[in-house]
Amino acid sequence: MHHCVTKVLATAVAAAITLLPTAPAFGADKDDFPAKTPIKHVVVIFQENVSFDHYFGTYPHAQPNKNATVYFAGAKDDTPRVNSLESAGLLTNNLNKMNPFRIDRSTPNTCDQNHNYSTEQAAFHGGLMDLFVQQTGCVDPVLGAGSVMGYYDGNTVTALWNYAQHFAMSDNYFGTTFGPSTPGLLNLVAGNTFEGSITNGLSAAGNIAGGANAGAVIGDPDPSGDNCSNPKRTQITMSGLNVGDLLNKAGVTWGSFMGGFANCAAVSTGTTGLTTADYIPHHAFFQYWNTTLNANHTPRTSVALIGHAGDAANHEYDINDFFDALKAHNLPAVSFLKARAIQDGHPGYSDPLDEQIFLVNTINALQKSDEWKETAVFITWDDSDGWYDHVMGPIVNQSNVSDDRLLGPGNCGTPSPNQIGGTSQNGRCGYGPRLPLVVVSPYAKKNYVDHRVTDQSSILRFIEDNWNLGRIGNGSTDAIAGTLNGLFDFDDEATAKTLILNPSTGQIVGSDSDHK
C-alpha cells in the first residue's frame, strides 16, 4: 500500500528505463511523414492541476449526485483493476489527517491547493503520503480545511471515465518532477527543467532551485521575450533544445496551440460563473526558448501554413487555429493544445465541467475528421495542484538543494553523476506526483489500464521515436522515459473507432460497433 523510497526506487527505475520496441516503418503518403507506427498525428491536450486520485480515485465506481442525477452509465464487466484509493483500501482509515471524500457535481469550483516544489515533497513525507492536509491543503469555503482530500467521480468527470472505458489509460504515470505548471510543460516538451536563466533581475527564490539566477526551474516564472508576460513577474529563458527544435530539423510539421494567444487581453466567463483571462504566459509551452518564440504573437499567414516552417508565427498559434487547420485537412503531425484558461481545469479559476466541454468538443471534432484514423490523442495534466494521491513513484533524479523536503530539509536524496544530468543538474527531484493519462485513438487498446512506470517525458519520447527524431540530450529524461506503446495495439485493424460524447454531460451520444 505504501512503499519506502528505496524499495520504490529499486523496483521502478528498471521499469522506467524500458526502451520503446523497434517497430516497422510505415510508408508515407504524399504530404505525410514516415512514422514507425500507424500514428501520423499526435495531439497532446495538456490540462491543469489534477492528481490521478482526484479524478480516478474510485474508478470505475461512481456514486449518484446529491440531486440523484447519474451521468456515468456504469463500468463494463471487463474493466481492469486500477491502483486507486478504493482498491488500495484508503477511503477509510487513511494515514492523512482525514479520510478522502467525494466532491459532488454541484461543487465544481474549489480553491487552488498549494502545489509548490517544496510543499509537495513535504506532503509525500518520504513516501508515507500522509501530510497533504498540513502541507498542500487550502481552506475551501464549501469543502473546508481538508479540501485537498476531495475527489470527483464519473458523475462529474463523466467524459474522462467514458474515454477510459472505451480506450486506454495509465495508473502509473507521473509528473517528471515536483512543482507547478511551468516545470510540467518544460518536462513535456524538453524532458528537462535545468536550463533556465532569469532575464529581468527579479527574485530567483521559488523560481530557480536554490535561489540561483540560473538552473532548475521549480516555480512559475513567465517566459522572457513574450510581450504578454508580466513585467512585474520573474521572467526566464531556456537554453538547450525542445522537441520543436527536433521536429524542425526533421522537417516534420508541428504546432503549439494556446487559448488566448491571438489576444492575450481577452477574458472569458465559464458556465459555472468563473471569469479569468484566456492566456497565461507561464503555461505557454514553447515561448521559453528563443528558437521557438513568437514574441509578438504574430498570427499565421494562412491556414495552409499552419504547422510549417518559415511562417512568421514560428509554430505558435491560437487555439482556434487548430480547428481551422483540422477543417482544412492541414492537421500538423504533432500538436500541443492548451485550452483557454476558463476550460483548462485549474482549480480557482476553472473547473471540471468547463474542462469537459473543451475536451469533448476537441475530441469529437477530431473523431469526425478524415485524419482520425491515423491520430492519437494524449490527455494529461501539467501538475497535481497538490491534490492528494496515495502513490509515490520512483525517484529517478535525486536532489539536495535548499528547496527539497522529500526526506527532510534540503533532502531528496544525494545527486550522483550516474543519474540523468549528473550532479551538475541539481534541483530536479522526481518523479513527482501521479497524474492521469488517457489515450484516445483508433489504435488505443479498449478499456485498458497500463501499469508501466511512465512520466511526462514519455510523451516526448513517443513523439521522438515515432518520427525518428533522436534524443534531446543534456540531461533530458527522454533517455529513461518509460514506453507508452503498451497503451496501443498497432496490430489491430485501422478502423476509425469513435466515441462521440455530449460536451455538457460527458454522456455517450454515439459510437461505432467496436464501442457499443
Image: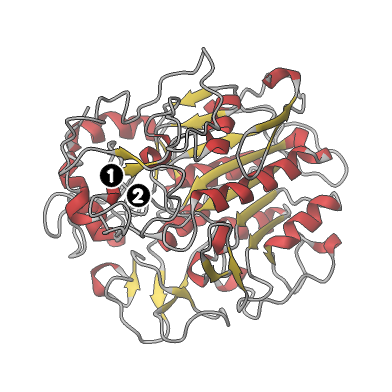
Report the number of numbered marks: 2
Pick the quarter of the image with the C terminus: top right
Farthest left residue? Answer: 408
Q: Nearer the viewer, residue 159 or 289?
A: 159
Residue ID at (69%, 66%): 317
Res 420 label: 2
Q: Position of residue 267 (x, y in %)?
A: 60, 73
Residue ID at (42%, 29%): 63
Q: Is residue 280 visible?
A: yes
Q: Nearer the viewer, residue 246 or 181?
A: 181
Q: Position of residue 62 (x, y in %)?
A: 44, 29
Q: Residues within 10 Å of mark 2 (few under 14, many from 20)?
A: many
Residue ID at (49%, 18%): 79
270 lies above or below 435: below
Residue 295 in which image quadrant = bottom right
Res 149 label: 1
Q: Secondary structure at mark 2?
A: loop
* First along the sequence among labels 1 and 2: 1
Pick the quarter of the image with the N terminus: top left
Spatial CA span between label 1 and label 2: 33 Å
Q: Is residue 418 visible?
A: no
Res 40 label: none
Whether tag 1 and tag 2 are in contact, CB under 8 A, the answer is no
